[in-house]
Amino acid sequence: MSLIEKAKSFLGFDIKEDKYALVDDPIFGKVAKAKAPDKWVRTTCGYCGVGCGMYIGVKEGNAVYSKGDPTHPVNMGTLCPKGLSEHEMVRADTRVARPLVRKNGELVPVSWDEAFSKTAETFKRIQAEYGKGAVAVISTGQLLTEEFYMLGKFTQLGLQTNNYDGNTTLCMASAVMGYKQTFGSDGPVGCYEDFSKAEVIMLIGANIADNHPILKLHIQRNQKVRGKKPTIIVIDPRKSKTSQMADIFVPLKPRSDLALLNGLCYIIMEQGWEDEAFIKARTNGYREFRKHIMANYPPQEVAQITGIDVKTLYELARTYALAESAMSAWTMGVNQSLSVPIRSPPSTTSRSLPAISAKRAARRCPSPDSATPWVHGSSGSPHPFPVTAIMPAMPTVRNLPIL
């Protein structure tokens, strides 16, 4: 850059029109001229698992733009900073663009043909010498459904081994077992729309403001949909951006979440906020569960374990149990928490709908509290936390894990 060009840039005479000029795009209106795409490819964001729809702009074969899909129900055209920069990782300097094979102690780039041949020959040699089970596959949680299916079939039918695992085991194993033992299926029973309709929202072990900001937008829609602000409960040992948006922040001690949840069960049952007719019609093992809770999780004991005073425990239970419509959302803070219960409670399973509901009182609607964030205690068995509630009129489970 010449001295004259530098002076123009410093004084503001050079507005860098070629770099910052905008052109019309048939889908998104104005886009930067320098990287105006030749086409847009509709896809799904591959980061956190919220499932945001997006378009990747492609120019001369390279990804140059990321835009939110305005028709997608999850993000409705918005993207968080991770999604907006997703196209940049395709050509990132730190990305491995070619297969690498170790030769003479060093990883060196090779052709795809050589890499495939080397891998296949090595698998065949190992299995011939040690058996089919000597080979294992570890996957990521970022694959799409079709890719998971294909990899599973390749592992079972191609390699003929059942040694197949991935980071999804660490992330969701406790939730999967809880859901299957309770509902017979490991599919979540809530939906994002519940964020905008719930009177009370309990977030436990979930920093959505930082990690899943698109879901925070769903919560922000709540006041517009309902006409008033929801009560937000945040349960987390850490202070976070999410805790700053809480009406009730519960900074429990690490590893004490199981005691807190069972303590809330105690208070709900002590105060008579459960609907026993509802429970008996839809669950098994409730009598044993109640007996265990009432014998082992009095509020004074729970306060000692969690560091949360008795008054706050009662306020927390009352706020959630007596809400006309409530929901809970949780992430790895619960799934990967090794809580130490006083004693492992008996398992409570559901025949159709969830385990506990609040009694109808005055104008309150019955609120079926489900075994939602399932937590593994030291015994390794899942323990239910009754915290999910319903929308008025129809007793529907509202319970949402965030990946």
Image: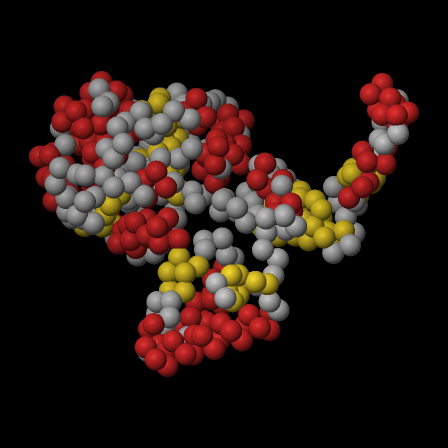
The residue most toward the bottom is 128
Position of the C terminus, as image quadrant, is top left
Residue 171 vs 195, above or below: the answer is below
Residue 299 vs 205, above or below: the answer is above
Q: Which of 42 and 201 is in front in this view?
A: 42
Q: Nearer the viewer, residue 111 or 293?
A: 111
From the viewer's perspective, is 7 left or right of 353? right
Residue plotted at (32% across, 44% down): 335
Q: Where is residue 333 in the image (x, y as percent from the top left)?
A: 34, 38
Residue plotted at (50% across, 25% down): 223
Q: Which of 142 and 62 is in front in this view?
A: 62
Report if residue 29 is visible in the image. no
From the viewer's perspective, is 24 left or right of 260? right
Residue plotted at (25% across, 41% down): 338
Q: Position of residue 195 (x, y in %)?
A: 46, 35
The residue most toward the front is 104
Q: Which of 391 and 362 is in front in this view?
A: 391
The residue most toward the right is 4
From the viewer's perspective, is 368 left or right of 13? left
Residue plotted at (87% across, 21% down): 7
Q: Position of residue 193 (x, y in %)?
A: 48, 39
Q: Where is residue 32 in the image (x, y as percent from the top left)?
A: 78, 38
